[in-house]
Image (cartoon, rainbow, N blue to C red):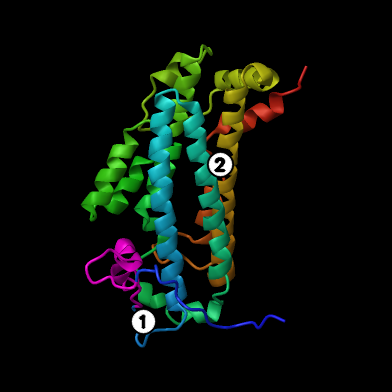
């Protein structure tokens, strides 16, 4: 009969002396990372730690999404569709993690949040420059948003650059043209600092691709990956809205927005409108 133990001896080869070697903590700079959670409520409210960590971890995941999207954009530009889709596959997993995180914040009750919400001043998730950068890379360009970041030169510079850079959808459409599809010239020469607008000619291209999937399999698959990307983004927006609604009801946002109403209108925004519109067309006689 084996005896279960609640301790184990260290293997002799395990490193224990890190006086002059890189350790797990030093590699990840945990001294900086774990000291960045500084509640502003006085005395510090217990639940503010949850609020801070929720948003800090979201920003870390957004940093990785940006890292991946920039490469996806370059892969599409270089006609490397397979590697671009690998990047999107990773982003989709990150999106699921970001969406599920709202369930943790949803444990913050209205009365608990009310005890420290006033301490947040005018700070708001609306001011997340990384979130805006993700939107810009996906195609939701809006130059008006730059005004929010005028006091942060680095953020303003990043968003200004992305505003004038092609989105991943721009690059996908250009790839379609290089593949021989009859993409309308105005889509190839448009002002990329503006949000993409719906084009019926592109819908007809997608219809052909979907109805001849076996002959265009990689493009067909890429279309579905882009739809997955937007679906996940919309689920994140929806969970955000519902978490805010259950926590503050219909109060205004700390950053001055209308709160839930503002977030609800964001659900009407789309990155790839033709990829949704084509579903109505497929199979019609």
Quadrant hosting residue 256: bottom left
The residue under label 1 is: 41
Q: Residue at x 24, y 54 (%)?
A: 152
Q: Position of residue 101 (x, y in %)?
A: 54, 63
Image location (x, y in percent) of residue 206: 61, 22
Q: Which residues are magenta?
A: 16-39
Q: Give residue 157's quadrant in the image.
A: top left
Q: CA distance from mark 1 to mark 2?
A: 37 Å
**SS of the residue under disc 2:** helix
Q: Residue furthest right?
A: 285
Reply yes or no: does residue 37 show up in magenta: yes
Residue 22 belongs to magenta span: yes
Could you tell me if residue 141 is visible in this image? Answer: no
The quadrant the N terminus occupies is bottom right
Instruction: Locate residue 133, reporting x and y percent.
Output: 38, 45
Determine whether, in the image, residue 225 is placed left or right of residue 121. Answer: right
Q: Looking at the image, which is closer to me, 221 or 193?
A: 221
Residue at 28% of width from left, 70% of height from top? 18
């Amino acid at each position: 009969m084996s005896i279960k133990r609640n301790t184990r001896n260290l293997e002799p080869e395990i490193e224990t002396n890190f006086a002059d070697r890189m350790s797990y903590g030093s590699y990840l700079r945990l001294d900086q990372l774990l000291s960045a959670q500084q509640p502003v409520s006085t005395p510090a409210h217990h639940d503010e730690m949850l609020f801070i960590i929720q948003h800090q971890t979201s920003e870390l995941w957004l940093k990785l999404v940006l890292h991946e999207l920039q490469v996806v954009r370059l892969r599409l530009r270089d006609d490397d569709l397979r590697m671009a889709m690998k990047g999107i596959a990773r982003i989709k997993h990150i999106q699921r993690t970001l969406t599920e995180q709202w369930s943790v914040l949803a444990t913050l009750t209205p009365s608990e949040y009310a005890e420290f919400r006033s301490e947040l001043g005018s700070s708001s998730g609306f001011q997340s420059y990384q979130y805006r950068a993700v939107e810009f890379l996906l195609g939701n360009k809006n130059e008006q948003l730059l005004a929010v970041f005028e006091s942060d030169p680095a953020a303003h510079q990043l968003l200004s650059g992305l505003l004038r850079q092609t989105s991943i959808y721009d690059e996908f459409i250009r790839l379609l043209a290089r593949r021989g599809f009859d993409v309308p010239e105005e889509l190839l020469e448009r002002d990329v600092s503006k949000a993409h607008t719906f084009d019926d000619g592109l819908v007809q291209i997608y219809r052909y691709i979907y109805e001849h999937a076996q002959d265009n399999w990689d493009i067909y698959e890429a279309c579905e990956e882009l739809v997955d990307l937007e679906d996940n983004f919309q689920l994140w927006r929806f969970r955000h809205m519902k978490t805010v609604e259950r926590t503050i009801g219909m109060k205004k946002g700390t950053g001055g927005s209308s709160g839930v109403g503002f977030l609800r209108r964001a659900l009407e925004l789309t990155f790839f409108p033709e990829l949704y519109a084509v579903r109505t067309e497929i199979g019609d006689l």
